[in-house]
Structures are given as C-alpha cells and as structure tokens.
Amino acid sequence: MSSHPLRIAVAGASGRMGRMLIEAIAASGDCQLTAALDQPQSPSLGQDAAAFLGQSSGVAIESDLRSALAKADFLIDFTRPEGTLAHLQVCAELGVKVVIGTTGFDDAGKAAIAAAAQKTAVVFAPNMSVGVNVTLKLLELAAQALPDYDIEIVEAHHKHKVDAPSGTALKMGEVIAAAQNTALADRAVYERYGHTGARKAGSIGFATIRGGDIVGDHTVLFAGTGERIEISHKSSSRAGYAEGSVQAVRFLAKHSAGLFDMFDVLKLR
C-alpha cells in the first residue's frame, strides 16, 4: 500500500449519499477526504464536512469546483446528471479521476462520459454496491441458462427518487438481454394498463414501486412452466454503495484514462 493516501473530493457532500461516502473514506485507512462540494445555496457551506460524525476532517464544504478539484486526485459523484456532467468536464481538463454513481443519464450524457474517459479514468456504474454487481453476474448466468423463461424486474425505492425504473433495474435488464444476444430496447415493457393482451414472448417487464424510506430493493423473476426462480438484492443502507465507491477509487489509482464499471473493479468479467 502506498504511504500517500488517495486524495478524494466528494460532490453533494451534505446529502445522504455524500455523508455515507465521507464516513467510508474516514474509515478506509488508505483514503483521505481533501475536498467537499455542495451547491452554492447549500446551508452547509463553510461547515466541516465530517461535523455530522462528530469529527473534524479539516475540510470545509465549498461550492467552488475548481478550488475543490485542485486539492484532489479523485472525485466521487452521486448527484444529478447535469451536475455530474459539468463536474466531469473540469475533471477531464485537470486530470482528476472520477467515480460516477449518478443515474438517469440520457444517451447524450453517456456519450459525454465516454468522451471524458479518453482524457481521464472513470468508473461509471448505475450501482456501486459489491452485492448488486455480484447479483448482476448471477443474472447473466441465469439468463444464459434459461433462455425461454419469462423475465420480470421489480424494483422499489424511497419516495424521493426522481427517475424510474432505477438505473440498477435498467442495468439488470441490459445484462440479461446482452447475455441472450439481444438488446433491451427491443424487449423492454415499462408500462401495463388496461387490456394489454397476452404477454409477448421474449419481453422483459419492469414494475416500479416508490414509497417511504426504502433504500433499494430489486428482484428479477424468471418464470417457466411449473417453476420460477427469483434473484433478489435488498439494500438496508447506502453503506454498500459507499464501500464499493472506495474500492472503485483504489482501482482508478492504477489507471490514467479509460471508461470502466464495477465488473472491472471486482474482476467479474
């Protein structure tokens, strides 16, 4: 292990995920929080980023992106697509490596991430949880072994989540479709209402639940004749996402440029 700690900036530092990241960095042993970013109107500006832990990090929450990135070699970003893309442009310019946990990007946003990854190293995954990514690997195996089973994806999240289906649910669909040499866009059914007719063979259905403080539940149902298989992952806290993000930083420390995901980080290819 290097004697120099990995210098990390966290975007959205006073949000729920930002705080989980700060806590995971503080507990890591080989990483150091060197900058904490939030929006200009945040009431947390100027406060110590670790104050919520009853600790002093010596890092004040700020809104100046360039000032923050000048103090860091890595940025972990779980904000909103427009904010992440703005941060990413400056990171690519300055050579700061980026872990992106933000979801809800459109095709243009994904293309912008790929372009930035030619200049700096990026880990981009819709879910940073180690457990979720192992679940994706299990889905890949199941999809290959059960080509004729009906597939339904059910996801549940807290009432504040703004995109649906979740990025993780969509990734599950993409992994399943790719394992069967197809494209999700040709198979996905996102809404059912009224007289829908019989289920279309080969379709991948999605169902979305929003309520309360559910951190994130995902279940994939493979339904055959006389049996069904359910593969589920349930998050009870955001700690798993934070720990996976720290693992992604360690992975990026060995790369100068390129676009990677958590399968690369966890050697699940």
Image (cartoon, rainbow, N blue to C red):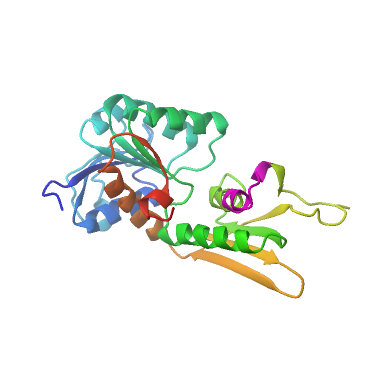
Residue drawn at (65%, 45%), measured in percent from left and top? 184
Q: Is residue 118 above or below residue 213?
A: above
Residue occupying image coordinates x 33% and y 49%: 248
Q: Residue lying farthest left? A: 3
Question: Can the viewer see residue 213 in this picture?
Answer: no
On the question of residue 249 being in view, the answer is yes
- Residues 134 and 44: in front is 134
Report the predominant secondary structure element of the magenta stretch: helix
| Residue in view at x 43 percent, y 51 percent | 263
The quadrant in which residue 156 appears is bottom right
From the viewer's side, name the closer residue of 76 and 23: 76
The magenta-colored residue range is 174-185
Q: Return the x and y of residue 29 as percentages of the image width and height.
A: 19, 57
Q: Horizontal and vertical percent for residue 192? A: 78, 52
Q: Position of residue 153 (x, y in %)?
A: 64, 58
Q: Is residue 144 above or below residue 81?
A: below
